[in-house]
Amino acid sequence: MKSYSIQEINEVINGVIYGTTSQSITATEQLEKATTSEISFIGNKKYEKYWSASNASVAVVNEDISIEPGENRAFIKVKNADLAMSQILALFAPPAPLFRTNIHKTATIDETAIIGEGANIGAGCYIGPKVEIGANATIYPNVTILDECTIGKNTIIWSGTVVRERCHVGNDCIIHPNATIGADGFGFRPCSEKGLVKIPQIGNVIIGNGVEIGANSCVDRGKFSSTILGDGCKIDNLVQIGHNSKLGKFCIMAGNSGLAGSVTLGNGVIIGGSASIKDHTIIGDGAVIGAGSGVTGNVPAGKTMLGYPAVEARYALKQWAMLKRMVCDPKK
């Protein structure tokens, strides 16, 4: 079991210790469930009230926390408790699943594939012709990587993922279980003789460095050219990214959100859960799309949009307030 003193933990997060405790810390836990050997977090003043009832000996807190830790208890004050929490969670993280050999004997690897030094490939994987896998990449069991794909160094691909032909994944990425990279875009046209005719999707997907894609998410290949995810994008579970969409750097898409075809996101765009974006829409740098919103037109940089159909947040809030007054008091 891992165990750290409060001083050892503070060496990692570089905060300021208030109070004292001799208790060794063996795990992390939320305030309500923590025991005396566990460290917790207070990232907002509204949670101060839960500290007195918590059994945690130590909490990492924001600098504006005003309460005292109490007897044989301590706070580590930092500028951002959420960021400090990520560092502490890394301290206590259990080891990754074990590879007893770098390449499992049941993996099928084409003779033309290039496997980088230190890469791990698990049982039941298929690595197709002319695939290149970078140094220290980790491919967990039952992953399929088809012809002419490239996977960057240190990238982790979890079980059940399919990376289809000619797609490219950058360095230091994480792709979670059962994601699909490079499936056909959704393209059909009416035909008097055949009903619906499929439009071939002959492009690919290009994923930048440091991208994370959640479980069961889909990134469709371009009809022609590429669907592109910029460096540092973070995609939640069950997200749909349509063909020929282009995401700038450090975009966030929460669960069940979706982009139709040929959507363009600027840098740092945030898409809330279950939001949907119409095809050929452009969303500017730093814009925020609220959860459940439906965007049907271009969004300027820095704007926050809410509602279905989405409008600027200030207008949406006014609309909702008016509707509430009408429902509660129809005479008004």
Image: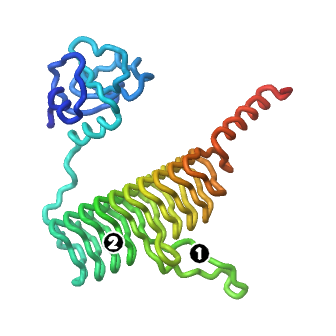
Question: What secondary structure is found at the residue carrying circle 1?
Answer: loop
Instruction: Count neighbours of disc 1 (C-alpha within 10 A) and say few if under 14, some if 14 to 19, many if 20 or more.
Output: some
Q: Which mark is residue 18?
A: none
Q: Position of residue 198 (x, y in %)?
A: 59, 80
Check the image and report above or below for 129 versus 174.
Answer: below
The residue labelled by disc 1 is 187
Q: Residue at x 23, y 43 (%)?
A: 93
Q: Which residue is mark 2?
A: 144
Picture coordinates of residue 89, whole percent (x, y): 26, 39
Dot 2 alpha-carbon crowd within 10 angstroms: few under 14, some 14 to 19, many 20 or more = many
The quarter in which the N terminus is drawn is top left
Q: Position of residue 256 (x, y in %)?
A: 52, 53
Q: Position of residue 281 (x, y in %)?
A: 60, 61
Under circle 2, the secondary element is strand
Who's the residue at 63% across and 57% down the image?
298
Q: Hey, what amino acid is under mark 2? A: Thr
Relative to 14, is 247 on the left or the right? right
Q: How is the image coloured?
A: rainbow
- Figure quadrant of residue 320: top right
Left or right of residue 71, residue 200 in this image: right
